[in-house]
Amino acid sequence: MASQHGVAPSPGRIQRYVPIVGWLPRYRLASAKSDAIAGLSVWALLVPQSLAYATLAGVPVQYGLYTAFAALIAYALFGTSRHLVEGPSAAVCAVVAAVIAPLVGAGAMGSAAAAPYAAALALVTGAVYIVLGLLRMGWVSTFLSKAVMGGFVLGFSIGIVIDQSHKLLGVPAPDGSYVRELWGTLKEIPDTSLATLAIGAGSLLMLLGMRYGLPAWPRALIVMALAILAVEWFDLTDHGVEVTGDVPTGLFSLGTPGIGWSDTDALLVGALAVVFVGYSESLAAARSMAVKHGYEIDTNQELIAQGVSCGGAGLVGGFAVDGSLSKTSVAASAGQKSQMASLINAVFVLLTMLFLASVFKNLPSATLGAVVIDAMVGLISLGQFRRYYRVNRIDWVFFVGAMCGILFIGIIAGILIGVVLSLLLLIARSSRTSVRREGRELSTGTYHAAEDYPDLEMVPGIVVARIDGPLFFADADRFRTLVMDMAAEEDHLVGVVVDVDAVHLTDTDGADILSQVAGELQSRGAALVLASVHTSTLGLWRRAGVLDVIGSDQVYATVDDAVRSVDRGSAARLQEHGSEDESSRRSDDGPKNEVEGDPAGLKRPTTEAGRRNDKS
């Protein structure tokens, strides 16, 4: 990890797991002004989003403030990104709601009864994150393909817009998948509350207008303030407009939720779903800032930082969090230099809890829904449809599949479908490792793919095949089929040279298929020879018995060496066989008219390699 002002020495154990120990003593007061402005700028966005996302998660609005406060401090202590802003996010909150709704019942969602379950999920999620981090499993961020993650994001974004639309209409929330919610909301349109629609639609129009017309303004905070004033001035609660109600002012309570062990399985599955969704978004935001500002992040430590952030939120009664790309972008644009900005932001959030929370009692639910919808609008990019369809149809199918899983089946099931789709995509692509025939370039003596260079020389009787990737269980049979097909096309086959320079991953199945191919070739009087084998790969194949089948002397450093060996061995066998035939003919018929010392002209080289050897 790089320090704030240069490359730091190797960190000690404490600094490794608590990065603030490394950068805080070096913090420059000159950066304080920029960090304070960034903290205040993010506060203006974080507070309204925290309130809105709390309702999306199914808990009272004050828990959004508790969550934001704990997450900001926890990530500042343990995170490796200078710019990432930790806090509530729409996608993670949607997962939280999907997990806890069956546990508390749909009727309890939005009440204080749902908060302990959301907190328990945050604690379990934190534990999963920390275990993954300690096991150095930062690579999990790359497990889901971009096509699948793109489908997730689009599906979530459209689905959350559908989920929040009933708030703008003032109608009851429907149950089921997002598609069922849409149908249920459409059926409720005749019962729309006009006052609620007016303030909800007005809030959304103002948010969207300011998004494009005044993007630097804290539009969510401004719209919330105006909506609260409208409710008070026009007594909109008397006209059916639903508001948040009393929001307690003061600090949270520390402790663990009193949830029984019987719900552990559901919470663990939900925690894995949160990790899949949240870590990908967090790492994408952290990496983009690291690249832009020229420093490194530690993906394994990021897992721990996310875990402590979620666990901290759970201890204060909040819900799971992640790193937000939108809030991180605001922080970077405002000049954030370090995580000191998050600590300053946490102070502002604390002051909000202590002195300003009660102001939000007349905040319309329709405006909260509009804030969520506005955030989702920025994530909906229909251009991905065209891009994936144009670039790669398989990626497009997986993109659409992940999106439809979220919309038509549900969040948890949709995430499971996305994981399965990623596994299928991984298996399908890993089982299609390229195996190509190579030819020799006369001027250099090097070997290249024949399909790319049609003027290459093909050595008679010898097949040179290159495998461009792993040789393991998923593609072993395909490798055998392709190599034996190449061998079948060669007249008077004497050997097959396999260039395995690109094989860094192999297993017992890969070794066994080599032994099988060698046996089949030997039954046809041909040899299997290996070239450019890496040490670790050769060690596994030796232990698996491959060298016992092909011969320990049939492994060469280069393809050219391997071809020369097969060529010389072929000539020697032919000469030996020819000598035996000639001796037999002499005994039967007497001397023949021949070139002395070269029966049947067998010593005349038939390949370029043979001609060079003959000249030397």
Image (tube, helix red, strand yellow):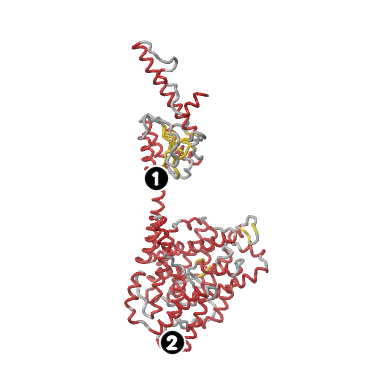
Q: Are marks 1 and 2 in contact (CB under 8 Å)?
A: no
Label 2 crowd (10 A; few <14 / some 14-19 / many >=20): some
Q: What mark, if any, has residue 403 been given in the picture?
A: none
In depth, the one of 161 and 528 nearer the eye is: 161
**Residue 549 seen in the figure:** no
Q: Where is residue 398, by image quadrant?
A: bottom left
Three-letter code for the amino acid on which mark 2 is drawn: Leu
N-terminal of the pair, mark 1 or mark 2, is 2
Quadrant into which the N terminus falls? bottom right
Q: Say whether residue 580 is left or right of residue 612.
A: left
The answer to whether residue 174 is above or below residue 430 is below
Label 1 crowd (10 A; few <14 / some 14-19 / many >=20): many
Three-letter code for the amino acid on which mark 1 is drawn: Asp
At which x and y percent is residue 578?
39, 20
In depth, the one of 224 and 315 nearer the eye is: 224
Mark 1 vs mark 2, CA separation in Å:
67 Å
Label 1 sits on residue: 475
**Residue 92 seen in the figure:** yes
Q: Where is residue 287, by image quadrant?
A: bottom right
- Count of labels in the image: 2
At which x and y percent is residue 268?
43, 63
Q: What mark, if any, has residue 236 been given in the picture?
A: 2
At which x and y percent is residue 592?
38, 13
At which x and y percent is residue 454?
43, 39
